[in-house]
Amino acid sequence: MPHKLFSLAYFPPISYWVAWMKPGTNFIDLAENYQKQSYRSRACVADPSGKKNLIVPIEHRSGVRLQTATADLSYSENWPLVHWRTLESSYRSSPYFEYYEDSLKALFGRQFETLADLCIASCEWVAQELEFDLEYEVLNEFLEAQDDEVDYRKRIHPKQPTLLKAEEYMQVFGDRHNFVPDLSILDLLFNKGPGSYSFLLESELQGA
């Protein structure tokens, strides 16, 4: 079975979960340097114009290179409330928003110290709602991928073409614009509900 290497991610995109569920052992890299404009601190969701980024602010220290695992969250603005209200505004009319509303709102009501804590909690919530075990091992020092390993750390990234090969599904703003692929897993959950699990298992990735 191959080893699969992942970055931390905040409510990761659908391609992340399709890769996660393929056979093999999952490793999350906690030794990476923090990178802006990546899925480590943003989730991409639907909105009337097409899509919107939910961005998690980080406390930056001058001259200090941050590691993703130890990057502290900034609460100078109430971004959890902003994220929740954005989701509520965009997805209230979706078929399954109310199905997940209470548990997800409770998650946004928690205050996490580090980005790693937040990302892992978001993934644990997804696994709990889809009823599968979130089994993974941790990399505490950065490793280059070996020949028998599949490295998704740079391949699943907002600035890279999506790896996802999957059927389209009904989206909340589908009457206003074309289908938007590979949004956050939240988009799939709100639109397909418990059927999201089989959707992920049946989907494929480019070059994987």
Image (tube, rainbow, N blue to C red):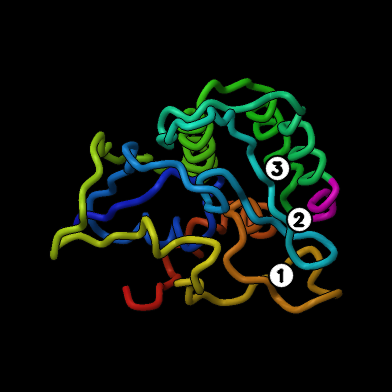
Q: Position of residue 104 (x, y in %)?
A: 66, 35
Q: Looking at this view, is 136 or 77 the one in front?
A: 77
**Mark 2 residue element:** loop
Q: Callout 3 environment at 10 Å: few (<14), some (14 to 19), or many (20+)?
A: some
Residue occupied by mark 3 = 99
Q: Position of residue 144 (x, y in %)?
A: 21, 54
Sequence-first tag of 3 and 1: 3
Mark 2 → mark 1, Cα distance in angstroms: 10 Å
Give the number of the disc on residue 170: 1
Q: Looking at this view, is 159 or 118 the one in front?
A: 159
**Mark 1 residue element:** loop
Residue drawn at 45 percent across, 57 percent down: 16
Q: Viewed as shown, does residue 154 lie left or right of 9? A: left
Mark 3 → mark 2, Cα distance in angstroms: 8 Å
Q: Viewed as shown, does residue 77 lie left or right of 63? A: right
Position of 4 relative to 171 (above/below): above
Q: State which region is magenta.
A: 89-94
Residue drawn at 62 percent across, 75 percent down: 168
Residue occupied by mark 2 = 95
